Amino acid sequence: MSNLVIIFLSIGLFFNFAGCLGLIRFPDIYNRLQASTKCVTLGTIFILLAVVIHFGWNSISLKAILCVVFILLTSPTAAHAIARGSHRAGFPLWEGSIMDRYREDQEGETESAN
Amino acid sequence: MLVFIILLLVCAFFCLYRVGAGPTPPDRTVAIDILGILMVGFCAILSLYTGKDLYMNVAISWALLSFIGTTALAKYLEGRTFDE
Amino acid sequence: MLKKLLEFLILWIIWTLLTWSLALPDILAGVVVSAIAVLLFSDLFPAEIGRLLHPRRLFWGLVYLPVFFWQVVKSNFDVAYRVFHPTMPIRPGIVKVRTSLRSEIARTFLANSITLTPGTLTVDCVDDHLYIHWINIISEDPEEETRLIVEKFEKYLRKIFD
């Protein structure tokens, strides 16, 4: 196993670790989504790139590249779905948050509808 | 190589902690989503270790199925039915 | 009809790459499965899929990739800094920005790009406006927010999709 593979795996696991630590440390659901989605996505992509570098051009690395594409497309979409779902269901932001334009607009709509 | 696998398992235990302790349902959903992506990385490391094609197949199907599961859970959170 | 043929070809190429064999039974199974998938789910594909294969759009797509990747790496170091910092310097909140992109697929890509870039996460998309959760709010003026978050991607995505 070459040094480049080890370096890529280390970078990937560093970001994975940062993302999971963010999942533990951050105060509310939206901040946790931010940390975990970004970091774990890039971390896993680096691990898959390490696979590509190690095997060169064969079926395993091709599957790894397809996996990178799938993860890049699906992971932000899943995060978006969870954020929207939990906000619609009424789970509040952290009390230290600065502003919530989404809630303001929704309340405005219900008032004008009544 | 073992070091990488152990580190990844530590990350997975962080996620499991959030699944168990998460104060609200969305927290648990996020943790399950992240656990799915972590397992894709785990399968990739396994295929790097063994040199077998099989684990990448598992990784691809895991990535897609975990996305479908998370989306279904998110819709359920939002209070809608699945056929909408 | 042309659209369905294109979808069929894309699906069949992905199938062949995944099975990684050119034996006759594999190819036939791929043809059958892709045909069933296209017949059942053809409506779910974005309507503009044929237009995206234009060389100019593909060129701008290739230009967009490094820009996107650089933003992703920057955002990861940003998040890692906030996670490992003992006091967690965050000022979160949800802001509202405006986008001028028209097509659905362009907005999807814009929302996904925003989610993976520094400190921002798309929460919802209503008409022309995107609601974005921002981990570190540095401005409370909507115009300034639009300039900071959206415009760096919009100029590329407009060339690719619109």
Image: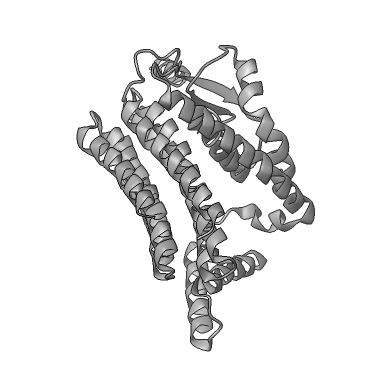
Q: Residue at x 59, y 68 (%)?
A: A57
Percent of width and height locating residue B82: 32, 48
* Location of the C terminus of chain A (image quadrant): top left
Percent of width and height locating residue C51: 71, 55
Nearest the camera: A44 or B24? A44
Nearest the camera: B79 or B40? B40
Is A1 positioned to the left or the right of C153 in the image? left
Q: Is residue B76 visible?
A: no
Is C76 positioned to the left or the right of B77 in the image? right
Nearest the camera: A9 or C156? A9
Colour scheme in the image? one colour
Picture quadrant where residue C65 is located:
top right
Q: Residue furthest left?
A: B20
Q: Residue at x 38, y 50 (%)?
A: B4
Judge whether B32 appears above or below B1 on screen.
above
Percent of width and height locating residue C133: 47, 25
Q: Is residue A58 visible?
A: yes
Is C35 positioned to the left or the right of B31 in the image? right
Nearest the camera: C26 or C68? C68
Is C18 positioned to the left or the right of B65 in the image? right
Percent of width and height locating residue B35: 33, 46
Judge whether C58 appears above or below B29 on screen.
below
Q: Residue furthest bottom?
A: C24
Judge whether C15 appears above or below A82 on screen.
below
Q: Residue at x 44, y 62 (%)?
A: B48
Q: How many numbered markers are drawn?
A: 0
